[in-house]
Amino acid sequence: MKWTKEQRNVTIAAYLGWTLDAFDFFLMVFVLKDIASEFHTKIPAVAFAITLTLAMRPVGAIIFGRLADRFGRRPTLMINVAIYSLLELLSGFSPNLMTLFVLRALFGIAMGGEWGVGSALTMETIPPRSRGIVSGLLQAGYPSGYLIASIVFGVLYQYVGWRGMFFVGVVPALLVLYIRGNVQESPAWKAMETTRHERAGLLTTIGKNWTLALYAIILMTAFNFFSHGTQDLYPTFLREQHHFDPHTVSIIAIVLNIGAIVGGLLFGMISEKIGRRRAICIAALIALPVLPVWAFSSGALMLAVGAFLMQISVQGAWGVIPVYLNEISPDEVRATFPGLVYQLGNLIASINATMQASVAASSGNNYAFALAVVAGVASVVIAVFILFGPERRGIDMTRSAQQVASSSSSV
């Protein structure tokens, strides 16, 4: 099926939105050690900023998701990108740790809104047969952001320091201009626009679908332990436990993110053939045989190989999530539901960075054990739990939205 110019532009905008959001988030994971040194504290204390960012993301999912369901995906996405870019810039001016905590919490609200709004806009716009590969592309935005942050750290950190890293993070604000000039509103949202005042609210809709919501929250909790448990403290693991220099850490981070991008695209495409649930299950189980190489190797080369393979597994499973959550979502709250359950899972899993850092610190900076336990448990939980969920591969979202609008207007 041939794509229109509007469909291409929407996909590009959503991919860049999540890429640059992740870029701003991951800039911090490279400089935990430096922030701790400047503010005369320990790394676990600074890692609490990551916990705050993750914990506040459900708030953003609700705020920006409801705005997008009510006023449209496009204008909400523009506001969202502008806000998270500004907060990233302000983080670099933090005079003390408490100010940094506040700014990272506010950044978490902005970060929590982007994913749900961008994925809904895209999945409602593109051809149904393209959703699998586009889902993988959208989710590849997350490791793409990590990859860019890795390159920036390797190239600029020695010149600009940790504060300069945050200043670079204002660049995503330029994406607003692209969205304004090239992106159209979702046809599914337009189909329901005239009945938005008659449609059931978020709480009513969630109440009618409470078993689906509970299932999705538990699933996304495991997913967030899987991703954050293998990514957020990995640079610190390389610097603290293996004492690698910033250049080596940057190279390994680049390699792991290339693996993540490959995994997301591969399993997103595979899910179009074998189904969303089977693709997720297979991807998650790849982590188990990779664990020893990823966590317990000693040399930079083998650690890079392990990191590459681990992220094929992690982001391979994640690559199916944008399309999976949007397909099973109730039409009335599609900009809110996927982002909300995703970010509530993030909230529950937000203890991960502090927990892993504390376990490592209490065992002589042995990060390998803390990383391996979280990754192994999460992969098994995902592989088993996903098989009990619904599958709505290929649903016509515009037609489904029209049916909801027709039903609402006739009540």
Image: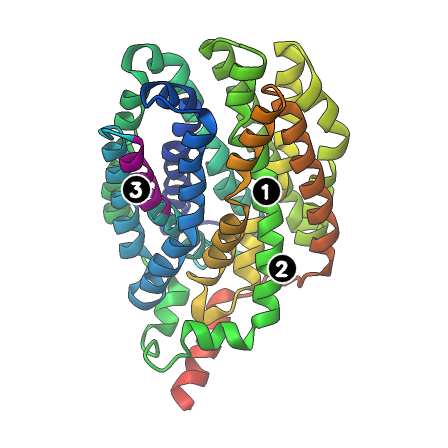
The quadrant of the rendering that contains the C terminus is bottom left
Label 2 residue SS: loop
Question: Does residue 215 appear to the left or right of 102 in the view shown?
Answer: right
Residue type at the position of mark 1: Phe
Q: Is residue 88 above or below residue 67?
A: above
At 30% from the left and 27% from the top, the residue drawn is 166
Residue that numbered label 1 is attached to: 225
Answer whether residue 293 is visible to the viewer in this image: yes
On the picture, is 87 further left or further right than 147? left
- Comparing marks 1 and 3, which lies closer to the viewer? 3
Of 71 and 367, which appears nearest the observer? Answer: 367
Tell me if residue 226 comes above or below residue 406 in the rendering: above
Q: Which residues are magenta?
A: 97-108
The magenta stretch spans residue 155:
no
State whether residue 147 appears in this view.
no
As drawn, is 44 to the left or to the right of 376?
left
Label 2, label 3: how far apart the Cα atoms are: 40 Å
Q: For the residue carrying disc 2, how many other residues have a C-alpha within 10 Å: few (<14), some (14-19), or many (20+)?
A: many
Residue shown at the point (66%, 52%) measured from the top left: 276
Residue 310 x/y as whole percent = 65, 29
**Disc 2: which residue:** 393
* C-alpha distance separating marks 1 and 3: 23 Å
In the image, what residue type sits under mark 2?
Arg
From the image, tell me which residue sits under label 3: 102
Q: Earlier in the sequence, mark 1 or mark 2?
A: 1
Q: Residue furthest right?
A: 289
Within the image, what quadrant is residue 269 found in?
top right
For the residues bearing labels 1 and 3, Cβ distance under 8 angstroms: no
